[in-house]
Image (cartoon, grey):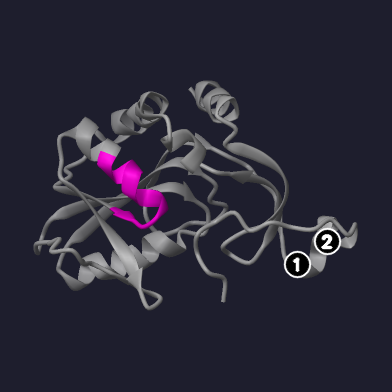
Amino acid sequence: MDNMVIDTLKEVNALLEGHFLLSSGKHSNRYCQCAKLLQYPDKAEKVLKLVAEKVKDLQIDLVVGPAMGGIIVAYELGRQLGKPAIFTERVEGVMSLRRGFEILPGQKILITEDVVTTGKSSLETVEVIKSFGGEVIGIACIADRTTTDVGLPVYGAVKLQIEAWDKENCPLCASGIEYVKPGSRAIK
């Protein structure tokens, strides 16, 4: 299964090589730009079907994707699972629930992402969900890049091992190679 996902990500040029500044502030020589996959609904459907299979037996009432990367993933997983799908978004830097979306007390919620590395956006979304009395049961994603426990089960279509360095220890910086920042989150 991993090979099919990797092949699909390569086919749509979603697995990038170069020098990247990640949302975490770390640097890397590879980057997974899942937006390149999500522009092809037929390919995204096939990749996310693998995730839907992993979570289909969980009790899920609602799928919630943090903006930006989790919105389309939430929609597609919600569609495949027959569940409603909504999203959270940052308002003045704080993850929030807007647009008339509701989370009811006791609802079992699956968070969705394109890529999970540190879990920062997902964990911000957990706080929003808890503030409404919802219960988070896990995180579903296209690419699981986690290297540490994020405190929730992670259900990914593929597990990616991508090396990352602090700026001070980055061999690409030491070589004078300029970096690009492809992600959507501002780095503080």
Residue 116 located within the stretch drawn in magenta: no
Residue name at image x 58 percent, y 40 percent:
160
Locate residue 60 relative to residue 117 in the image: left or right. left
Q: Earlier in the sequence, mark 2 or mark 1?
A: 1
Contact between marks 2 and 1 (CB within 8 A): the answer is: yes
Work out which residue is located at the far right of the displayed protein and give it: 175
Number of the label disc, if any, that sits on residue 167: 1
Number of the label disc, if any, that sits on residue 173: 2
Residue type beneath disc 1: Lys
* Residue 184 placement (x, y as % from top left): 50, 59
| Residue interval drawn in magenta | 65-75
Q: Is residue 57 at least partly visible in the picture?
A: no
Q: Residues within 10 Å of mark 2 (few under 14, many from 20)?
A: some
* Residue at mark 2 to residue at mark 1: CA–CA distance: 7 Å
Residue name at image x 61 percent, y 37 percent:
15
**In which quadrant is the C terminus drawn?**
bottom right
- Predominant SS along the magenta part: helix
* Residue 80 placement (x, y as % from top left): 23, 31
Residue 70 located within the stretch drawn in magenta: yes
Q: Is residue 179 at least partly visible in the picture?
A: yes
Residue type beneath disc 2: Cys
